[in-house]
Image (cartoon, rainbow, N blue to C red):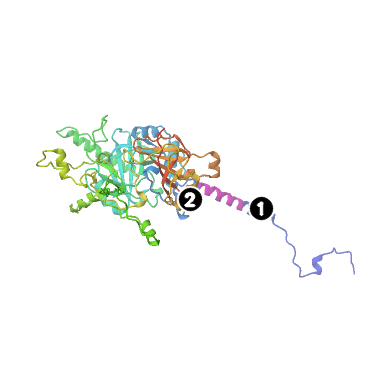
């Protein structure tokens, strides 16, 4: 045998051993690069989708993933912080923007609306002023909003601005809305009653500005001369692929052509030209004959005690009957007495004899008739009234001496306890105030303890609130505050200041602090908490009142 001519092969003597294969490093490198690119694309895509929900494809994907909430209804005192602009201010704000800047602004406006104004940079623009409806459009599947009405309006005091005012509602309310929203009707938006946010702005070919606004309160509307009330509802979803504005160029051109023909006919009439509200250049527009106004639900009337005082025969107060001792006596002591009838209830009882064909809504008895802009019925003069003092005393009763309850000539809106409007009367309430440090004993808490109060309730005890706050909104006798947080608290999410609103009610004669002011309250001058409401999204609405005497 020749042992040296053939090299040693370990697999030759072992025929059943698998031959070792070489590793393909090139294929592994390509696979790792592909996976890295896929992960990077998914990461960038998530940023693109979540940071730009105003794009139609992003909005559709977020809806399928259930990562987007439908628009919600806001309260008047809990609306986002914003600035109120009239027609001239809106025109000046958007007319100087270029195409790229206007597109960026529109994307931000729509993004804020989709996110329910949770991450707003700056102030939300709100529309105020008088506008006249020149065309109406029924919303359907081909529009951004699925159901409701849209009104194309012209500013009364400015001919350079047009506004699309959107009225989202359920299909059941459309027949009444078509009868109410007619051409020529005036829409009056006021700062103290309406919160209509701008969603889109567009520059027309002729240089005018067209803005689209939607009321964030989604309240009930009626006209000053007519019966019927329709209620708005937040849209369940949006069809962003339909595009903006709601009135397309062809439809808007036909509307303006009809208006031009109408003006020509009126100019050729023997009586001369008739000015159309919103289309003329008059410096002082005449008062509207009929207006579209928002109405608020009546606040519950506080029960008034009508029990006369008990006086004994010997000029001493009568002693109450002692309760029996024992467990039964304790139980009876804890039971609340039967509430007495109020003057408002008595007036409503007298109105039962009225015909049932016209339903009415009873407003608060504490609000004066002048605050509601309603005519007050004047009683018929008596045939014989020799003495005003004696005649009023003999013909009056405890019910007749009560404050008359104004009624709204409209159909009542469906009850909704989640949207009870916080309408403030012009004079404010009245309650006892105290000197600094002289208020009754109670528990003093900060903003960090409000979540516990919302979960457990006040439990019948006095709870006072201290802290440092910033005024976001101020009205006649109400103000909305936000807890002032430091940079460290914002980074560590301490205190929950971004999700807490403090709604302060001031007594009659007090002046709320101006918007932007800083309010400091300590153990000597706290607020008294009356209620804490926690919404589904974690938002805390804390209702407090001022109980301290002014300095």
The residue that mark 1 highlights is 29
User: Residue 197, can we see it?
Assistant: yes
The quadrant the N terminus occupies is bottom right
Q: Secondary structure at mark 2?
A: helix
Image spot of residue 448 (x, y percent): 50, 45
Determine whether, in the image, residue 336 is placed left or right of residue 464. Answer: left
* Residue 185, visible in the rendered structure: no
In the picture, measured across the screen, residue 28 lies left or right of residue 198, that is right
- Rate crowding at label 2 as few (under 14), some (14 to 19) or many (20 or more) other CA atoms within 10 Å: few
Majority secondary structure of magenta residues: helix
**Secondary structure found at label 1:** helix
| Spot occupied by residue 49 in the image (x, y as percentages of width and height) | 49, 48
Residue at the far front: name it.
314
Question: Which residue sits at x=74%, y=62%?
Answer: 20
C-alpha span from label 1 to label 2: 56 Å
Label 2 near label 1: C-beta < 8 Å? no
Determine the residue positioned at 71% across, 58% down: 23
| Sequence-wise first label, 1 or 2 | 1
Residue, far left? 383
Q: Nearer the viewer, residue 348 or 175?
A: 348
Residue 473: x percent and y percent?
40, 38
- The percent coordinates of residue 503 (x first, y second) are 40, 42
Q: Is residue 37 above or below residue 434?
A: below
Q: Quadrant of the C terminus?
A: top left
Q: What residue appears at the point 79 percent right and 69 percent down from the top-left corner? A: 14
Boundaries of the magenta span: 35-48
> Mark 2 sits on what residue?
452
């Amino acid at each position: 045998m020749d042992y040296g001519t053939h090299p040693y092969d370990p697999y030759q003597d072992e025929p059943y051993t698998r031959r070792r294969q070489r590793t393909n490093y090139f294929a592994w490198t390509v696979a790792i690069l592909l996976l890295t690119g896929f992960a990077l694309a998914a990461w960038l895509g998530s940023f693109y989708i979540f940071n730009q929900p105003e794009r139609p494809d992003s909005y559709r994907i977020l809806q399928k993933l259930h990562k987007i909430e439908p628009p919600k209804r806001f309260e008047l005192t809990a609306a986002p912080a914003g600035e109120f602009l009239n027609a001239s201010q809106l025109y000046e704000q958007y007319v100087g923007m270029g195409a790229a800047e206007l597109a960026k602004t529109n994307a931000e406006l729509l993004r804020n609306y989709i996110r329910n104004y949770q991450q707003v940079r700056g102030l939300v623009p709100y529309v105020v002023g008088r506008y006249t409806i020149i065309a109406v459009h029924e919303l359907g599947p081909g529009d951004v909003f699925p159901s409701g009405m849209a009104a194309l309006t012209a500013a009364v005091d400015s001919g350079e601005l047009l506004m699309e005012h959107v009225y989202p509602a359920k299909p059941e309310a459309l027949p009444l809305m078509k009868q109410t929203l007619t051409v020529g009707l005036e829409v009056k938006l006021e700062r103290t009653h309406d919160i209509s946010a701008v969603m889109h702005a567009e520059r027309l070919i002729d240089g005018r500005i067209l803005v689209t606004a939607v009321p964030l309160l989604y309240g009930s509307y009626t006209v000053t001369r007519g019966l019927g009330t329709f209620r708005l509802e937040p849209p369940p979803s949006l069809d962003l692929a339909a595009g903006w504005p709601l009135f397309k160029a062809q439809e808007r051109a036909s509307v303006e052509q009809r208006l031009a023909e109408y003006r020509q006919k009126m100019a050729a009439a023997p009586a001369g030209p008739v000015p159309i509200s919103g289309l003329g250049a008059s410096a002082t527009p005449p008062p509207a004959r009929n207006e579209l106004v928002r109405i608020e639900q009546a606040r519950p009337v506080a029960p008034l005690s009508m029990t006369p005082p008990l006086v004994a025969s010997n000029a001493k107060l009568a002693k109450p009957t002692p309760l029996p001792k024992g467990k039964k006596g304790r139980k009876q002591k804890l039971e609340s007495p039967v509430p007495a009838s109020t003057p408002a209830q008595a007036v409503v009882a007298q109105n039962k004899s009225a015909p049932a064909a016209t339903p009415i809504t009873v407003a608060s008895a504490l609000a004066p008739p002048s605050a509601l802009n309603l005519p007050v019925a004047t009683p018929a003069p008596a045939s014989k009234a020799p003495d005003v003092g004696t005649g009023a005393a003999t013909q009056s009763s405890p019910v007749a001496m009560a404050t008359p309850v104004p009624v709204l000539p409209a159909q009542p809106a469906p009850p909704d306890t989640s949207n009870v409007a916080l309408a403030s009367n012009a004079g404010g309430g009245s309650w006892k105030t105290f000197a600094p440090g002289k208020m009754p004993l109670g528990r003093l808490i900060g903003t960090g303890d409000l979540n516990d109060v919302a979960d457990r309730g006040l439990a019948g005890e006095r709870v006072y609130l201290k802290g440092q706050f910033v005024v976001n909104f101020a009205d006649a006798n109400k103000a909305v505050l936000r807890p002032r947080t430091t940079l460290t608290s914002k980074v560590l999410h301490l205190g929950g200041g971004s999700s807490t609103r403090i709604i302060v009610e001031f007594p009659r004669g007090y002046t709320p602090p101006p918007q932007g002011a800083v309010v400091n309250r300590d153990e000597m001058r706290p607020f008294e908490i009356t209620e804490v409401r926690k919404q589904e999204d974690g938002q805390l609405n804390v209702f407090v009142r001022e109980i301290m005497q002014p300095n």
